[in-house]
Amino acid sequence: MRISWSSIFDALLPVIATLAALAVGAVMLILLGANPLVAYGALLEGAFGSFNALADTIVKATPLLLVGIGICIAFRAGVINIGGEGQMILGGLSSIALGLAFPDAPGILMIPMALLIGFIAGGLWGGIPGYLKARFNVNEILSTIMLNVIAVQLMNLLLRGPLIQPNQKGAAAIPQTARLSAAFDLPRLVPTRLHLGALIAVILAIGVYFFLWRTTIGYRIRAVGLNAAASRYAGIKVNRYIVLSLMLSGAFSGLAGAIQVYGVNHFMITDGSAASFTGSAGFNGIVAALFGQLHPVGTIPASFLFGALLVGANKLQRVVQVPAALITALNGLVVVFVVSSELWRRKNARRRAIKELEEKLAAAAAKEISPQPEGGG
Amino acid sequence: MEDLFTGSVLIGLLASAIRLATPYLYAAIGETFGQRSGVLNLGVDGIMLMGAFSAFYVVFKTGDLVGGVLLAALVGLLMGLLMAFISVTLSAEQGISGIGVYLFGLGMSDLLFQKLINNVQTVSGFPVAPIPLLSEIPVLGPILFRQNVLVYGAYILVPIAWFVLNKTTLGLKIKAVGENPEAADTLGVSVSRIRYFTVSLGGMLSGIAGASLSIALLNVFQFNLTNGLGFIAIALVYFGGWRPTWVLLGSLIFSFVNALQIWVQVVGLPIPSDIAVMTPYILTIVVLVISAQRVRPPSALSKAYERLE
């Protein structure tokens, strides 16, 4: 493939879209009476200003990356998974249940088992909308959103009941679990909060890239997403790959939940909302994946960027007194801008295709009417 | 159980089901127009949140209920226009851009709330306005005719929507654009103008849906007040097979289950509240399964229309 200006422009589109969102954010900051330069400066410092800040940014980016690579798989198969929040919760619940059930197990055994069960639980939860779509043609956007709410209630139920910390009793009981055995804590990479989960996520992102672009199953998943009718004609069992892609997507979100429990929180508590556990990573992972152009490797820097925005938002809130909710609003704008910018990518692609065709035609014409070099045409 | 579930309890349940259906009706009827013309607006919940906050803010500061509804409608309209611009003019992927609009509304309403009000306050919202004579009818009176103005508005909206979609040229154009935009375009119907109209209308009604929550039903605002209500409204559009009358039926069933679920908690039946809260959502999934077998969405739903030039 030739590198042209328009393809460079394509690659830069998400960056341009994000800058546009930040520009809108600057206007909002001015309207709220804050100096945008000071605000964004505080954001940068909060995210990158120290070794600890940088580690926190990576810790925050980890669930975004895991959810994001799952999103890449689903979106590449042409299905939209909005269920990351619920799938993370299922991953968290199943993994903590395992860890609490066997508190004396050796960490070297428990950690991989817990992450695996989180992966599986998230996959099963993601498989439900997959099955409903394949079998009953139920819109997966709506079913995943409903399953998010159901997962939250399941979390509340379990944390109030079977999983509650044994000494929490009576009406004033706080719905939280006991702390997991310290032997199960994911190893720290450096003396900060940075844990092994970040490394796992990066390795998996690269692995998913190979899966999607270098294996038959991955090829079929992408084929289904590009053109389901043609894939069916070519003998690909489209429904099977829809279920598979939603299961895998859910599985990575489930793993994100398990890693959140074993790497960061070490216990679970609920205030009745999903965000108290997930930090909205189920949604923000979509933003990161879109920014990474639905490419698992591209999602790595994208997650890092959005992790930085989320960590920096707290500093921004302290310095200029603008609520961190600003970042949620800006994330929404980033999604809107990135998705909208696809228009220019399509236009570019069309222009390139036309140009290529014209060149081919000209070459063919030149061949036919040679030796005259300047044929009409 | 038998002595708990008396006639007056049932009347109370039905009356609250009628009331609780209000936000669903505004949002779902609005979304019906958009989807009938081929645009899936997933940002409804975010628009509702912005509408809910705008209305609440006006009432909190001035006590002007009508002004609150008007601002909510205006904010909803503007967000609808934004969604129309994204999905029609920029022909962006509708499912994902709707989630962007949702996140924007979720964050923005929380930002404004924290900045301008900052703690949970209540306002005195729309009072009950009994309709003379009709409200005196036994059983039906208390259920149907002792509600507030926004509730009545939601139910008046249903026949209007039915009439516009089925008995007017505009309705015909909307449906044509949603079924076969190329053909409609060939016949001289402006696909983008129709879609701009329906999506802005949907946005405006979503804004009012939010207002109905914050200044007519709950009379409060807090972070994520809607708690996914807008998404359920979208599910109800699917359940209703894109027809206003069926959307009404779906909203009523859903709200009745919700009222029942709240009643079960209040009475203290031995059902965990989490399971009670979960039930309407499980029901929604079941309903989605059933309706997906029964009706077919508009052919051009969530497909951007680009003229080949």
Image (tube, coloured by chain):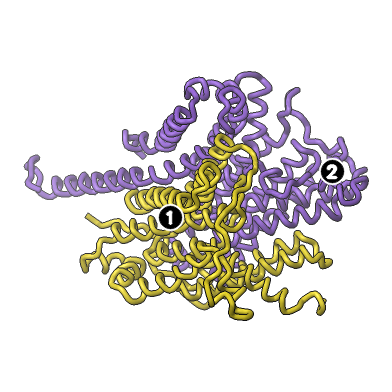
Chain colours: A purple, B yellow
Q: Residue at x 82, y 78 (%)?
A: B3
At x 70% / y 46%, what residue is drawn? Answer: A255
The image position of residue B218, as x and y in percent, is 62, 55
Tell me the residue at 47%/43% (across/down). A335
Position of residue A249 relative to residue A296, above or below, is below
Work out whether residue A213 can be spotted: no
Quarter-of-image position of residue B302: bottom left
Tag 2 subunit: A
| Label 1 secondary element | helix
Between marks 1 and 2 in the image, the one whose residue lies nearer the viewer: 1
In the rendered structure, find residue A33 and report the number of the disc placed on it.
Answer: none
From this viewpoint, is residue A225 visible?
yes
Tag 2's secondary structure?
helix
Chain under label 1? Answer: B
Q: Position of residue B55 (x, y in %)?
A: 50, 49
**Mark 1 belongs to which amino acid?**
Gly
Q: Is residue A63 left or right of residue A176?
A: left
Give me the residue at 10% from left, 48% from top.
A377
The residue labelled by disc 1 is B203
Kindly indicate the quadrant of the structure image that contains residue A190: top right
Estimate how packed mark 2 is, as few (under 14), some (14 to 19) or many (20 or more) residues with alpha carbons within 10 Å.
Answer: few
Q: Residues within 10 Å of mark 1 (few under 14, many from 20)?
A: many
Considering depth in this image, is A34 or B6 the residue closer to the camera?
Answer: B6
Q: How many marks?
A: 2
Query: What's the mark number on residue A109?
Result: 2
